[in-house]
Image (tube, grey):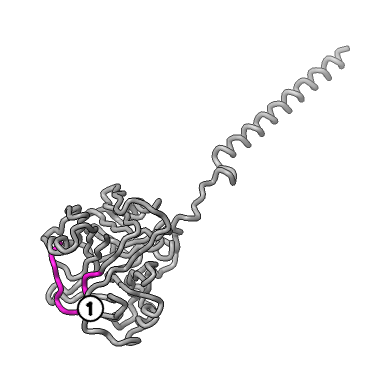
Amino acid sequence: MERKKKKKKIYIIILILLMFITIVCFGGYATRELITPTEKTIPNVSDQPKKTSASNGYVEQKGEEAAVGSIALVDDAGVPEWVKVPSKVNLDKFTDLSTNNITIYRINNPEVLKTVTNRTDQRMKMSEVIAKYPNALIMNASAFDMQTGQVAGFQINNGKLIQDWSPGTTTQYAFVINKDGSCKIYDSSTPALTIIKNGGQQAYDFGTAIIRDGKIQPSDGSVDWKIHIFIANDKDNNLYAILSDTNAGYDNIIKSVSNLKLQNMLLLDSGGSSQLSVNGKTIVASQDDRAVPDYIVMK
């Protein structure tokens, strides 16, 4: 009789242990499901720019010799022509998406004009450009020589080459708008003749590619404490005018544009040249009312 009682107690203990193990295992699985989402709950990030460890985001990256001299320069590209940049969606023309001390304007289905047409001094103040194009978004673009006023970097307007890549092995970049309105960032390994044959109508040049072909490029230090401006386009081919405040920083800038599905983003002339107006209203004023030769105008 005593032996039966002992066996009964052992069975009860085993049963309790089995129940405890079952509860622990189920709880662990449930917790794992909460911490590690199933495939169904993982957000779709395929449309977001992808980080890359490639070094082609560096301004000072030494690469192959710049492809210069493929086509003759023109003395003047003529009267600036508008290029239609069609988007895949219909939205408001100008949308303010500013955040975290980063001024961001999305431009939908615009016509785009580049003001500089030759290598002489074509500097204008923002007020002069507004007077010409009052119902537009206007932002300074390419860099220039402060002494001579000559535009710097790789320059195309109206599908004609104003200025070629600088000779040497330092990689240079340009944001190109094609005749069909598509946008692409080229580097100095591609000859101007190829870019123009591919449809290149306007080129804007100054600094590094921040995002290229949907991939975030590594910081090279050129985006520092100063005010910076950028030109960008997204998957739907909307254009973006982006200006960062002082001390915004590379990481904060990338964070602020991370949900925009940008495909290309290029650093343009920054510092005291940085300025933006929308429909005649100054959004970001130049620190010294600086006249510059190259503006991008979008209407």
Q: Please tell me which residue lies in front, 236 or 102.
A: 236
Assess disc 1: are there few (<14), some (14-19) or many (≥20) residues with their C-alpha within 10 Å of its C-alpha: few
Q: Please tell me which residue lies in front, 225 or 189.
A: 189
Which quadrant: the N terminus?
top right
Q: Residue at x 35, y 86 (%)?
A: 70
Q: In the rendered image, is residue 218 in sight?
A: no
Please say whether residue 291 is one of the residues in the magenta stretch: no
Residue 297 on image: x %, y %: 24, 63
**Residue 82's image quarter?**
bottom left
Residue 198 on image: x %, y %: 41, 77
Residue 245 relative to residue 46: left or right: left
Give the magenta range.
114-126
Q: In the rendered image, is residue 5 in sight?
A: yes
Please say whether residue 118 is one of the residues in the magenta stretch: yes
Q: Residue at x 17, y 74 (%)?
A: 145
Q: Residue at x 37, y 73 (%)?
A: 186
**Residue 30's image quarter?**
top right
Residue 118 on image: x %, y %: 20, 78
Q: Please tell me which residue lies in front, 178 or 153.
A: 178
Q: Main secondary structure of the magenta part?
A: loop
Instruction: Work out whether 115 lies above or below 252.
Output: below
**Residue at the extreme top:** 1
Q: Residue at x 40, y 51 (%)?
A: 259
Residue 269 on image: x %, y %: 23, 66
| Residue of label 1 | 78
Instruction: Work out whether 31 lies above or below 60.
Output: above
Which quadrant: the C terminus?
bottom left
- Give the SS element for disc 1: loop
Q: Amino acid at mark 1?
A: Gly
